[in-house]
Image: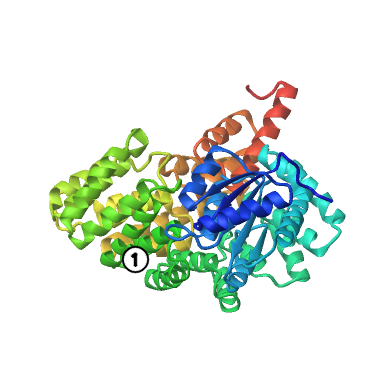
Amino acid sequence: MNVFSDTTTVLIIDDSLTVRQSLRAMLSNVGVTRSETAANAADGLLRLQKRSFDVVLCDYNLGEGMNGQEMLEQLRTTGSYPLTSVWIMITGERSYERVVAAAEVAPDDYILKPFSSQVLFDRMQSAFTRKRFLKPAHLHLINGREDLAISTMEDLVSQATSPTLKLDVLRLLAETHLALEHYTEASRCYGEILEMRVIPWAKMGLARIFKAQDKVEASTDLLNEIINDAPHYTDAYDTLAHNLARCGQFAESLTVLEKAVALSPRNFRRLCLTGESALNAGDPAKAAIYLEKAVRIGRNNSAFGPDVLIDLLQAHSEAGNAEKMDQVANELNGMLKGEHHVFLLHVCRAMTLLGRKSWMEAQESLKQAAALLLQPQLSWRSGVRFLEAVARLPDDLDGYHGNDWVKQLSLRLVRTHQDVEQLSALAKKSIGLIRAVHDAYGYLQSINDEAVSLAKDKRKADAAKLLYDTAKATLNERLGMNACALLLQLADANSIGLAQELLQWLPPDHERVHGLQATLHRLRNAGQQDEVLPD
């Protein structure tokens, strides 16, 4: 049965004109006449931005720029490629079998050259049929109804008529649970997959769950096992590098990322991570090499933004390359617009001044940034950049307040012991700054311990007030979540109002925050029915 019709659309991406023409002829032979072509990844991305295609036939090697695998990874990661569309990779490299077997983001199928029109038709039809089986779940995901998607997939598992279809459903179900931070359910799905077949990407899913739960050692052990079994699995290198960086092992993290870059030399995101890792490891010259390559490759990338340029500015600043530093700074001044970028503007100005060893002027810029440390939108990465700039100031400057600034930053950002290790390592052996990080963590721990003691003494209201006051003063997410949980347990009108206030700045995509929001919603609904709680 032919699943294609005269409305089926296909995009062919190949850098060879002869191959593009040959593929169009093959498609015509099987009745598919609505096809377009692109000669490289940039052209393909542009066409995919303008319209959707039922099928993409993409060559693995596309000449200059991204290869087909990197292009697919970018599209899937950014959500730019519809779940309902089929992606088939075409390659003459038998080594691609190892790549696709380990790929976190895999095509729906792949074809090894040379092949006939019939082989192309059969593989397209098979991929199309599998995609159609998953379509009900895909449509729910596209419409933002993850709950309906999950229940649909649970039904599809029992309906799967082949191991391949069952694996497809379980993989999508596991990824959906993982994206929603439903770690127990995701672990169950990956475990079921591994009972069917030992697959690197299923192990990788478990490693990501361990990482998200701050089980760094368990995650690292599993990642090393994955890399040993599937040395082409570049995502495993990325996650392992992140785990090492979390523990302040920046040189080791850089070594791992450089191995991944050697396997995938034109991946924009990985080049950025490697440049950042080189900065953290204290090698700005090497950082500049990776970051400049990332900028060259990534300018047409949808993920391209100020972050890579800020890291490049820092690399040139630390290396003392004033001319290149000024070029990057000028470009950043045109990109960092709006109130939400003011903090980073101050930090970037400090970087350029530090590159010229203008210590007092740099300190003044960092002082202005320090006044904004309690902005709700401050990210971990922005905070780290601030810390790294402060660590370059001589601590004998007149009016030096670096230790106080870093303590305030740590009170804001620190959640776990791994955070302490990472920030301490970034302090570049400054005893005062390292002490500030540890003092902040000690204070946060003492507040949390006191709240636990009060709660055990049946003084939940006092415990909640202590956590609420400290969380409000520091914007520390861990204390904010703990405070919110206690306030919702108290469940009186005032406590619910305070919990709602905390939820306005706690990260909305965090699994625990999801649960807190659901509890708040339930309490408010119950209160409205009883005419007890305020609107």
The residue under the point 78% across, 69% down is 196
Quadrant location of residue 485? top right
Q: Is residue 206 left or right of residue 475?
A: right
Instruction: Tell me if mark 1 has few (under 14), some (14-19) or many (20+) residues whose alpha carbon lies within 10 angstroms of its own.
Output: many
| Viewer-side residue, 166 vs 4 | 4
Quadrant location of residue 424? bottom left
Residue 8 drawn at (x, y percent): 70, 43
The residue under the point 39% across, 58% down is 272
The residue under the point 78% across, 52% down is 129
Q: Is residue 335 left or right of residue 41?
A: left
Amino acid type, residue under disc 1 in the picture: Ala
* Residue for badge 1: 278
- Say if residue 429 shows up in the picture: no
| Viewer-side residue, 480 vs 189 | 189
Q: Is residue 94 above or below residue 422?
A: below
Residue 260 drawn at (x, y percent): 47, 69
